[in-house]
Every structure is written in structure tokens, then in C-alpha cells.
Amino acid sequence: MKRLAFLSFTIATLIAPIQVQAQTGCVKFPQKPNPEAELQYLLSHPGAVVCPGPRTDPAVTTKILEQGAAERAASGRILRCTMSGRC
């Protein structure tokens, strides 16, 4: 039952931004942040444009995006290293 509730919540979290994107051309995430669901949505929709929030700080946004890109690059390096066996 918990899995079903989690699945329905996850689906609702992923569908809500799609409805907003269809109306405005950009994705608006809920006020209560859910970084994992937002990241999953953005990874599955690479061309999605995120609407700016009411109090968006460009410097913080840039820092977060750079940190995320660095983490993904590091994960990719680790994966390639592990798969090649040359670690």
C-alpha cells in the first residue's frame, strides 16, 4: 500500500509540471521543493525550461547547476573507470 501511495505521489509530482509547461511554455515546480523528483523530471525531459521562482537568485541557481554538473561528471568518471577495470 505504501508503494502504491508513493507511486501515485511520484506520478502526480511528475505530471503537474507538464500541465504548467503546456500553458506557459516553462515548467513550474511546487513551492515545497523535492529535489529528487525535480531532477528526475528534468533528466527525463532534457529540453524542459524551468520557470523562475518568485525569489530566484541567479548566483545561487548557477552554483547549484554547476555543482550538479560536477557531480554527474564525477559519477560518469567513476562508472567508466569501474567498467573499464582501470581504476
Image (cartoon, grey):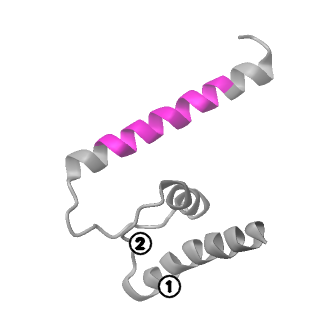
Q: Which mark is residue 19?
A: 1
Q: Which mark is residue 59?
A: none
**Relative to 67, 12 lies left or right:** right
**Up-down relation of residue 23 to residue 45 (above or below):** below
**Up-down relation of residue 77 to residue 23 (above or below):** above
What span is in magenta? Answer: 63-78
Quadrant of the snapshot with the C terminus:
top right
Helix, strand or loop status at disc 1: helix
Q: Position of residue 42 (x, y in %)?
A: 52, 60
Q: Position of residue 75 (x, y in %)?
A: 60, 31
**Up-down relation of residue 12 to residue 45 (above or below):** below
Q: CA distance from mark 1 to mark 2?
A: 12 Å
- Residue 76 part of the magenta-drawn span: yes
- Residue 37 part of the magenta-drawn span: no
Mark 1 near mark 2, Cβ–Cβ under 8 Å? no
**Relative to 24, 81 lies left or right:** right
Quadrant of the snapshot with the N terminus:
bottom right
Q: Position of residue 86 (x, y in %)?
A: 75, 11
Q: Position of residue 38 (x, y in %)?
A: 50, 61
The amino acid pointed to by label 1 is Gln
- Name the residue: 41% across, 72% down: 30
The amino acid pointed to by label 2 is Pro
- Chief secondary structure of the magenta portion: helix
| Mark 1 crowd level (few <14, some 14–19, many ≥20, 10 Å Cα) | some
Q: Which mark is residue 30?
A: 2
User: Camera-side residue: 1 or 16?
Assistant: 1
**Up-down relation of residue 40 to residue 18 (above or below):** above
- Name the residue: 38% across, 66% down: 50
